[in-house]
Amino acid sequence: MKFSYQWLSELVEDLDIDAKEVSRRITLHTAESEGVEVHGALLKGACPATVLTVEAIPNSHNVKAEVETELYGKKTLACGAPNCRAGLRTMYVPLGVKRVSGVDSDGMLASAAELGINSDHDGIIELEGELGLEADSIIEIDNKSLTHRPDLWGHYGMARELAAILDKPLVDPVSMELLPVGAPVQPVVIEEFGLCPRYSAQVFEGVTVGESPWWMQYRLGSIGLNSISNIVDVTNWVLAELPQPTHAFDADKIQGKIIVRRAKQGERLLALNGEEYELSADDLVIADEAGALAIAGVIGGKASAIGPDTKRIVFESANFNASAIRKTSSRLKLRTDASMRFEKAQDPHNTLRAIARAAELLEMVCPEIVAVGGPTDVCAELKPMPVIHLSLPWLYRKLGRELPKSQVIGILERLAFGVVDQGEALEVTVPSWRATKDVSIPDDLVEEIGRTVGYATIDPVAPAMPVVPPPVNEERRFYNQLRSVATQQGFHEVYNYSFLSEAQAAKLGVPVEAHIKVLNPIASDQSLMRTTLLHGVLKNFEDNLKNFDQFRFFEIGKEIHKQPEGLPKEVAHLAAGFYSSGGDGAEGLRELERLARAFAPTMRFQPAAEARPFEHPLRSVELYLDTMLLGRIFEFHPNWVEGRAAVLDLNLGPLACMLAGIPKKYQPIRRFPSSEFDLSVLTPARTFSSEVEKALRSSASNAVEQIQFVREFTLPDGQRSLSFRVTVANQERTLTQDEITAERDGMIAAIRHAGFELR
Amino acid sequence: MIAEVEALAEGALARIHAAVNLDEMEAVRVEVLGRKGSLAEFGKRMGKLSAEERVAAGKALNGAKTSLEAAFDLKKTAFETAALDARLAGEWLDLTIPPQGIVPGSLHPLTQIQNEIESLFFSMGFTILDGPEVETEFYNFDALNIPPDHPARDMQDTFWLEGGHLLRTHTSPVQIRGMQRLGPPLRMIAPGRVFRNEEVDPSHEHTFYQLEGMMVDRDVSIANLLYFMKTLLSGIFKRDVTVRLRPGFFPFVEPGFELDIQCMVCGGEGCPVCKHSGWVELLPCGLVHPNVLRSGGINPDEYGGFAFGLGLTRLVMMRYLIDDIRWLQSGDLRFLKQF
């Protein structure tokens, strides 16, 4: 929303700070200013001038003109305007001498567009009398910071803020004595007061539609409203000032009563913007007895619009339900200056004020205009103004500082709140334009007083609070441990998106239906929620192998799984990847196994029963802690990733709990020496060492302290030789040779029983 | 005999001195000092001497033995030292070769900043909470005093999921979950991933990270909020920061503020970073709206509180001067290896 400094200074008496300072004060006390810009910059130093002579320049569309300026004497310049002719009175702008079309052109003659009046760029401005315009400063306020303030969508509301902040008198632009009097002329029916609490309308005749004066065009142009015609410009002026949106219908195109009603399902309306809209019963329309005339609070219709031949108008000033307007405007994707204001919940008390102000302005821009009768005013019973009980000690506790009572009362009154002093408390009546949804509880008044006195006047105070150690978030702590282990092992942390595409899902063979769908994705490649981190991992491989021959990365993120009811299940996983462009691939897989063991030393690897389609057919293991399946290590099939791409996928939910559940206990250091013996086992090709180890363990007595894999070796015939070192010991004494031999024999028997041989 | 001993000793001493290696010297030692060596031979002959002669011969014998042993030890040490020196002299090593093997990886910059802020808050008595990324309309909007017709609920801001759920648009739902779980008084933060339905460009992401903070107690004032924010931000930026509050509208707080910090690039003089205002908008905050306390099961007549939201993604970009937000979730190791 743009605010004109000139406009504000007409409404705040004796405004003695410049636009920049106004912008700063508004930011500190009211709403965020995005900065100040100059409007009509060329008006600075400009003056009227009369064209004395015009001379064609060969081979140029420009002419050489000599002008008599009112401030700078005679000037010669090049001008490209088709209406540059001797005797014309126009505006001269001093810009210094520039060579144009072979002429030393000293300054320029300006068009209305160049001076910031309107968009007329067809020729230089043609003056009758004085222009009377000065460069203005435009303060732009962030719309988002005005969401809760319907009153600040117009200059009068912002002027009230400024007046309150600066403690200056506020000038009301509305004189209610200018409201036409007499019997209402235009009949109006409101079908649902819930959707339209008030509809006021005034008929005028003697209308001549034409251009509005430059001062009005310039003022509206400065805040981004294009001049349309004198009548429409008045509606925009009132909107930008009060900020009541209004609309002017051509009265001769209205048949009978004005009816405010819900649209019929499928009812169509050709709007002022040239678009045809199909409406539903959720939309509110302004209709006459023949059909819809306008989409209420959003846009007028073409059929009833005023045009060059309009002689009589119905001037509408109404109030509509905010959320109904917002719904219609967002469904039709049509945000207008009117709908933006109505959706903030405008003050129903404002409609007649707008008509009074419009009557005054219409007479200025269209002197023959005459009001016919007085306004029609159909109105629901309006709610009484809310009264808030404000305890002063409570207020000071919330602020964290005290204030003189007189100051509190002064601030509230300057902001137009009614105040009754009750000693320790105040009875505060909320003004109608703040009561629609903005101010209703004492906490709202804390803000009014705090911001007006200025938050800078509040000194920081340490809160009085108990000193207690906060509970530790064990899950997060665990994840951070994993992160630090992974980075120590050379893995870089990545963050991947939670979204994926249907194609990505298909690539890993996950059915689309297994995913939660996003109903309004930004792009089709973000339409599903991930049920595994592997899509991201695959992409990380694909993206990075272009830049690196070898790399390691990991992510801790959430899988999101559909549930029959309630919220989806979010399961934290760790996925790690190791890539190598060449080699036999063992390195990466082994390194991921080491990583998994670094997380949980008792992690067990068990060959996966079946490789998934995207996995190397012979390279996948399942990860177990006790009997619980926690994850998987595998190599991507070369058809999925070229080179060697090894992956660890670990479910962190149960892992965190299980590791937390394993208490660490000290074992006394043995006082008696241990003994070791080696066993080399001969197995058929492709026998997993875990099978041999299982056999060894099956016969191990309590004396066996450790069974450790030592080395492997493949014989020429393909058989494998797997060597293990067994450590045996006793806490109480040294084991005898017989005991050790018995242990060894037992294990050999177990090996044979499992179908293997000793080498 | 004494003369013979002396002659032997002299000869042996000369040979020890002349020895060029440990082996030669060892040969002399065995020959002279050994169990069957020459000096031992003299010892055997002592028995035949008179008592008087024996004392004198014994003296001579011991003297020879002692001086030979000393000479022998001295020379042996010299040989050993020379041998060690020779070994060490041959062991030149280029220690400037960069070490081979695993180079440590890196934590994502968002993790790093999150850890820093978490420990800062933990030290001030705040519990760290998590909340789901998929939320209900109740927790994400209703409970936070965002009425059904608030623009934030429009399709263009929120990702809606099948089943009526949504991707949380802020970490604020954890305020409600936290109040329900902990009860008053409480201090909590909730960092996490949030989603907005926005087109992605160098400064906009649909997925980013926030940190929610909340304190609920009896009599929490704006002055307390200011104190906490100032302490917190000095901790984050590791220097004293100047802050200011100005009005800001957020439905879940009343009053609501935008907190600005004085621009650290220009010190408040005005520069391109702060758009020449001297201030940088940093975080929204405010006193918790009574309706929000009620949603969390806390009686607003007894308790009050403050809440704030910190944009972690933005903080990371500020700290490392990252010019394109999309790097953060690119998974590109050329970027990530820098942290």
Image (cartoon, rainbow, N blue to C red):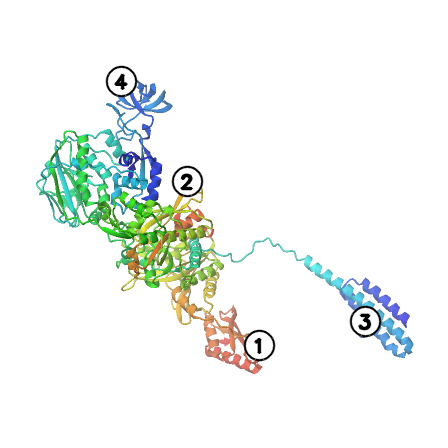
Residue A669, above or below A560 = below
Residue A166, above or below B1 = above
Q: State the mark number for residue B33.
A: 3
Q: CA distance from mark 3 to mark 1?
A: 45 Å
Residue B231 is situated, as x and y percent measured from the top left of the image, at 43, 52
* Residue hosting label 1: A671
- Secondary structure of the residue carrying tag 3 is helix
- Secondary structure of the residue carrying tag 2 is loop
Do residues under tags 4 and 3 come within 8 Å of each other at their CB atoms? Answer: no
- Please report, as a chain letter, where disc 2 is located: B
Q: CA distance from mark 3 to mark 2?
A: 93 Å
- Secondary structure of the residue carrying tag 1 is loop
Residue depth check, mark 3 versus mark 2: number of the one nearer the observer: 2
Q: Amino acid at mark 2?
A: Pro
Q: Are marks 1 and 4 on the same chain?
A: yes
Q: Residue furthest bottom?
A: A738
Q: Amino acid at mark 1?
A: Arg
Do residues under tags 3 and 1 come within 8 Å of each other at their CB atoms? Answer: no
- Secondary structure of the residue carrying tag 4 is loop
